[in-house]
Structures are given as structure tokens and as C-alpha cells.
Amino acid sequence: EVQLLESGGGLVQPGGSLRLSCVASGFTFSSYVMNWVRQAPGKGLEWVSPISSSGGTTYYADSVKGRFTISRDNSKNTLYLQMNSLRAEDTAVYYCARKNTENAFDIWGQGTMVTVSS
Amino acid sequence: SSELTQPPSLSVSPGQTASITCSGDRLGDKYACWYQQKPGQSPVLVIYQDNKRPSGIPERFSGSNSGNTATLTISGTQAMDEADYYCQAWDSSTVVFGGGTKLTVL
């Protein structure tokens, strides 16, 4: 079964750090561009960051640029999101999502909740 | 980056047709996707490349895209179709999501 499983969310104080992980199974992870998408409580979807299949190319939304770092370990079928200098507005469910060859996000994880609060 | 505009809400009676619009500058020149999200669940891709359905998505879901508007159409809407729907497109290698439409079936 094709699956993505996120972990690493939790409660963190403003200015703190968290590292999210997303473990893939059921497909050749190293062949796909992977993404982080977040959703603040009661709000819509926001694309945060993609990473190329090799890990050599990344991109960040302006809202997280300079604070978040996306990476991947293809030997472990795992996607990461290092989040530093967290702010209250980063509070959201963070999803990892696979981009398929038709440029659609066809597989989504169950999400992991990040709450930034003192 | 460009924006995609959706109506915040839409109500439809069971068995009727629901049409959810997504507007953006020259959206018809790009491919549009649609995602369904039920409460407490992850988004699910229901339409890609304007009008293609992934495996497992019912035939009552269809899409179109022309000019500045993409449309998701649900024919014979069922109670199980009640959900939030998001359009998405690519703009200069970046992803843009619409604000979402809450579809109520009543």
C-alpha cells in the first residue's frame, strides 16, 4: 500500500525548533518530488516547501524562508522538515505530499500537528 | 504569485449538480487540480490536469478549465460528498491553492 506517515509534531514555545519526519512506503520514494503542505486551524492549504527527487533542489514559501529547511534521505525513504525560529502563525497541521508525474499531489500523509504557543 | 478565488460555501440538495468555481488570471492556460477534504481527514486528489479522475474517484466528479475559471462539477451529489474542496494550479513553478469551498449537501 502506498503510504506516507508523518511524525514529530507537538507543542513548542515561540522561537523554538521542531523536526518533522515523513516515512514513505509502497512506492519508489527516490523517484518523486516531495512536498510539505500545511493547514492552520480552520484555514485552507498552504504549500510550504518542495524538494526534488535527488534532494538537490529545494524551494520555500516566503512565509518560512530562512527558518525552515527541507531535506530527504532516500536510503531511509524519509522526508524531513527542520523548523527553527517558530512563530505562532506556524501553528498548523503539516502534511507531506507526493507530487506525481502529472504535477498533482496524489498521495498525502495523515498530518502532524504543530502548535507554537507559550 | 497569482491567486485562486473560490466561493467560501455552496449548498446543494442530494441528487442535484454541484458546480464549484475557481478563478484566476489566465487559469485556463494552466492545469488545474481539485482536492476533497472531509473533516479531520487529509486532502484527496479528485481531479488533475483539468478533467482527469484518479483511480477510485467516482464518475460523478468531473472538471473543466477555460479562460479564467476552472470548475469542479459533481453530478448527482451524495451526502458523502459533503466536504471542503480546494483547487490548485502551478504558477511559475510555484503551487497556488484556492481558499477552499465548503460544500453542504442538504
Image (cartoon, rainbow, N blue to C red):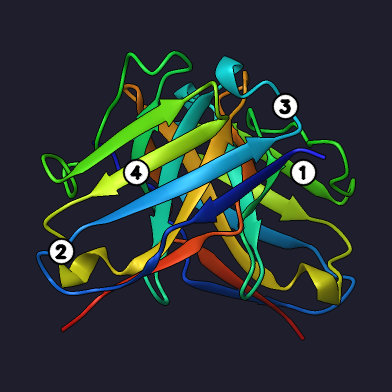
Q: Nearer the viewer, mark 3 or mark 1?
A: 3
The image quarter in which residue A36 lies: top left
Quickly name the residue at label 2. A16
What is the secondary structure assignment of the residue under circle 2?
loop
Q: Dividing the image into 4 quarters, which one contains the C terminus of chain B?
A: bottom right
The correct choice, above or below, for B4 with respect to B40 in the image is above
Q: Amino acid at mark 4?
A: Leu
**Label 2 with label 1: CB-CB less than 8 Å:** no
Quickly name the residue at label 4. A81
Quickly name the residue at label 3. A27
Give the mark nearest the N terminus, 3 or 4.
3
Quickly name the residue at label 1. B62
Q: Nearer the viewer, mark 3 or mark 2?
A: 2
- Count the marks: 4
What is the secondary structure assignment of the residue under circle 3?
loop
Whole-angstrom CA distance, mark 2 to mark 4, is 14 Å
